[in-house]
Image (tube, rainbow, N blue to C red):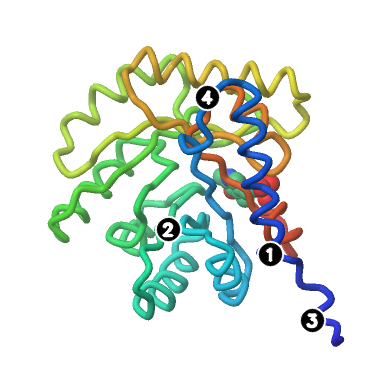
Amino acid sequence: MNDDKSAKPDIKGNYSKILAEINSTALACGRNPKDIKLIAVSKTKPIEYVKEAILGGAKDFGENRPQELKAKFDEINSHSDCDLRWHQIGHLQKNKVKYVVGRAALIHSLDSLELAAEIDKKAKQLEIVQDVLIQVNISGEESKFGISEEELGGFIERLKGFSNINLKGLMTISVKDYNREQNRELFGRLKELAEQYGVRELSMGMTNDFKEAIEAGATMIRVGTAIFGARDYGVQNQ
Ligand SMILES: *Cc1c(COP(=O)(O)O)cnc(C)c1O
């Protein structure tokens, strides 16, 4: 065995393992596992890793760099019959919207009206309606991005003015040093906000906290490390 091969994680095995954990966690708290979508976060990982996850049954992939999402989408979706969905999960700059709209099934990180205007404009050009989630900054610390709880109601009102944006739900990122209980509270708060504003999808939970997220009502979890292994370079921004 060469080094490359021994360094490569068992992606198919990892993917099934996470699916099994989603199942048992959901059943243990009285939820239907089918209501929870696993997004395989393939950021920084090569296309071969994505292909192996596809063989394991993955259909949803998360990226945080728009050019990387574009490159992987263009390579895989143009050569494949299966219907794969790409998710923009990291902070999106206005000047990168052009790479994402028309390729991402869902943008999880809408966090400003300026960005909404840009997404709406690009979606109009392509004659599509772009599905989005609003990133909410629940903790008020740590995370640099996201709409605060206080601003959320007004933000949702203003979004209604953009005809080519469809709001599906909310997304949040937990705080790195939080324990299980703190995570569960934070995720529970996002669930309350979704109910208050009448939106359905809740994107929350990553490798270290997806079980708490499921217990709190997540409809999508974003798991990278537990499927594809540790990333080589730090993920700035998130
Ligand atoms: C990188 C990233 C993830 C995946 O994190 P892991 O800890 O590797 O599972 C999930 N969500 C966002 C927004 C990310 O940037």
Work out how far the residue at label 1 is from the one at label 2, CA to CA, in angstroms: 18 Å
- From the viewer's perspective, tell me whether residue 156 is left or right of residue 42: left
- From the viewer's perspective, tell me whether residue 146 is left or right of residue 224: left
Check disc 2 and give the amino acid type: Trp
Q: Position of residue 171 (x, y in %)?
A: 48, 33
Work out how far the residue at label 3 is from the one at label 4, CA to CA, in angstroms: 39 Å
**Residue at label 4?**
217
Work out how far the residue at label 2 is from the one at label 4, CA to CA, in angstroms: 22 Å
Check disc 4 and give the amino acid type: Gly
Query: Reading the chain from its start, which is encountered first: label 3 or label 1?
Result: 3
Q: Residue at point 48% right, 19% down?
A: 191
- Of labels 3 and 1, the one closer to you: 1
Check disc 1 and give the amino acid type: Ile
Q: Position of residue 65 (x, y in %)?
A: 51, 60
Check disc 3 and give the amino acid type: Asp
**Residue at label 2?**
86
